[in-house]
Amino acid sequence: MIVEELVLPVLMVFFMLAAGAYTVAVLDRVIAGALGTPQAGSVWIVPLARGAWLMTQHANATEAPDWRAWRLAPALYLSLAAIGLAVVPWSGSLVATDLATSVVLWGSVEALATVVIFLHGWSANALFALIGGYRYVALGLSYILISMFVLIGVALPAESLQFTQVVASQGELWNLIRQPLGLPLFLIVGLGMTFWGPLNLADSADLAGGTAAEISGPPRLVWDVARAAMLVAFSGVATSAFLGGWLGPWLPGPLWVVIKMLAVLLVLLLLGRLLPRLAPERCVTLMWVVLLPLSFIDLVWAGVGALL
Amino acid sequence: MAVNWLRNLASRRSVPVFPVLGVQGDKALRHLTLSPDIELVDSPRHASVLLVAGEIPADRFEPLRRVHDQLPSPFTTLWFRCEPWPHLESVIRVDDLDVLPAALVTAYRELMKGRRESSPRILPDKPPNPWEGEGDFGQGGEGMMGGVPYGRPMAMNMEDDIRDGLTLDSLTFRLGPFFFAFPPGMAAEITLQGDLVQTWKTQLVAYPQSLDPVFFTARERPVPIAELELARARHHLHRLYRGLHLAGLESASLSALRLAQNLSTTSTLDGLHRYLSRSGFFRLAAIKGGVLGPEQARRIGGPAARAAGLDEDLRSDDAGYRRLGFSPVSQAGGDTGARWRQVLAEIDQSLQLARQAERDDMTTSEVDRIETPRGPWLEKRPEDASALLDEILPGQEWGDALATIASLDVAAVAEASLDTQTASEPRITNTLDSEGGRT
Amino acid sequence: MALTTLFVILISSLGAGILMQWLPMRHQPRPAWSQRAPFLGGGTPDSHAWSRYHIRYYPMTLLLIAFEMEMMFMYPWAVVFVEKGMKAMMEMGMFLAILSVGIVYAWREGVFKWQ
């Protein structure tokens, strides 16, 4: 009993963390190559080589950082990604943790991610990292609401906050079609939470790497792995909420989940490479004035749809 | 043993290089951007190799020492077309651009496999200010927030904020000559409150940039307009490459660079322009702000002035251009977005003029009035315009400020003697024998 | 039980993250002071970076708190929505409408710009 209920979920989550981070690295490299970045080396080996390089590089220090927070922040982000992955259902019975309130847990993961990323930037006590952290908070606070309204819209037809129920409620029709505004909004939120691509205000190029400007070596490895894992957790939740999770003909449930997650990851990584970085002011205005009303409309639509 | 195995694996990745640009170092930067084995990084913490590209003037030696010491171990340096410092051990110097990527790869692999020692630090291992012996953490001493805890004072508030008058702490710092978002060689002293620039004072101006030799030849005798216009387009494409890289559009910046390398009269900008419009570069990226007033626009001249609405272009005085039906392009607004639109429009115009001029075999007719891509050249070469930055950047948010700098071409034009070195950057193919054939 | 599992996952992934940093770093020497200077392209800072940072989006955070409270009410509302039918829809609609007035007011006041 202990083995099933305790050890197996932990192993599952760790496997997802490792495999997910590796998949994101490989996919990102493939997409970058397809878009024209000059690359050499096998696409499977190079991510491992980068990981090895980071392990052997010395960890950087700044003059007077908050040591505990600085070293904890990447590990905290990793554990938030792990918790996010723990609620993703692989089939009706194969979930790491089948909470009755998974949607609420996911919301808290998002909210805490804001704190962790800010902490990572602030604790370095260096200029660019500090600016990156503070800039991220503006973005982070804005997208939490959008994500929650969209997820509540998904929970309405399921009459439950449990992700397994949400997937089960998509038996006839996926939420992608029933609530068309939901997935695009959620994808934008995903790019925001992992500050990827157009919403990369925290680790951005105009800040020489932002919160990651002063880190090197093993802490940078953990930070990058955590970002990739969060992206994977995110696509897992998107799959369960909008793409019908394990539902699908012929293939076994978990395989469908993998396929759908890969599809969402592909879309996110493509968007990350194709769009320019948003200006912070424009980003905040966009989130509150355009995307938030759209999420209201999505909620109303979902409500009407659930009642009919 | 485990460390050796890891290091062997680590040697199989692309070389992470932090480039430090000296005079004429941007040729190396562009060559390395398109090299598959090299990854150029923005922060020295993310690099294992420090590349010093181009001659570093003596007043930038101290910043170079600082940046050199900021790379984490293990690291090594490589000097390209620059005299390496004698007190460093086992330095490599490379002068040939084609050999540079391979030299970097060799240096990195030797470093990883242990055949090369990591470079020692140059600066002494002391905190910036002595603070041991005061309070437990260095506090105490003068003033309300006195002392230098851990070697530096705490930030104190100086002035009211520009936008809303709130008086919180300002951070003053010098952003050095080796910051990638600046024109090479520029250093400024900046005061930020939050992420808004309060004051900006240029301390070291950017290195004078070298123009294509055809512009200097055009001052002595008539040159084919096709060649002149292709050189102009190439200059603008190089600026576009930097600006797009800063905006986060990697693939667009690489295609701009590739277009510049293979530029001929059959090249077209349409694909890139379409992609930029569709990706939202003109609406989403940091393109507001940095508005030039008419007096400032006149001072800087060139495409930036035309983007602010000034319709002046020395090419309209030239009989050859007039026969080709040239009329200056300009935008209204004068902000960063207008300047990028102007650059794209000028590249397009240059390509069209080059095509027509090649067909009709036109040459320039004026020799003492040349419109360079940097600005008009009457008696004196275009001068440095960094003082303009001190005026327009305060009040802008950080990302907007950097985008403004990327869109403005403030460096002066160097003398012709600086670029008679081996320009081993790929040049245009001979335009005169592409009749009827596609390049 | 699921919560215990979640807690174990949290602690073990946190431990893994910390271990992944600590194990390679055990034998690395503390970096020299010249390496620890913040990266400013070769320049120097005047002071530590920690300061009373001007957060220009502060009014936006107040608006956020209002919406967060609404979100808290919407979680249980979502579960009983289908049972209660149109009445639940109306109530939440009114709640949303009132808060939307807040967004419009904030927008007109320039809260979403860096002011």
Image (spheres, grey):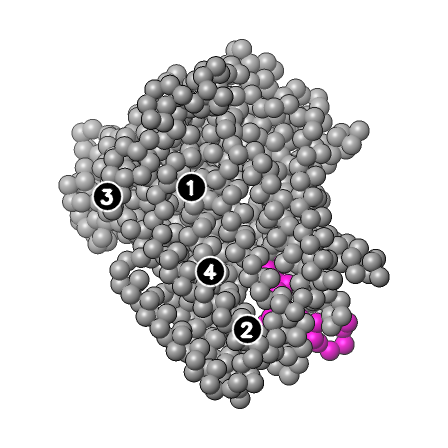
Please count the marks in the image.
Answer: 4
Which residue in the structure is indicated by mark 4?
A: A143
The residue that appears at 78% across and 57% down in the rendered structure is A6
Residue type marked 4: Tyr
Which region shows up in magenta? A233-252
Circle 2 — which element?
helix
Which residue in the structure is indicated by mark 2?
A: C76
- Foreground: disc 1 or disc 2: 2
Circle 1 — which element?
helix
Q: Are marks 3 and 1 in contact (CB under 8 Å)?
A: no
Q: Mark 4 and mark 2: span between their CA atoms? A: 21 Å
Task: Say which chain tag 2 marks.
Answer: C
Rate crowding at label 3 as few (under 14), some (14 to 19) or many (20 or more) other CA atoms within 10 Å.
few
Extreme-bottom residue of the structure: A308
Which residue in the structure is indicated by mark 1?
A: A131
Left or right of residue B224: residue B260 = right
Residue B336 position within the rendered picture, expressed as x and y whole percent measured from the top left: 30, 48
Is residue B354 visible to us here?
A: no
Left or right of residue B167: residue C27 = right
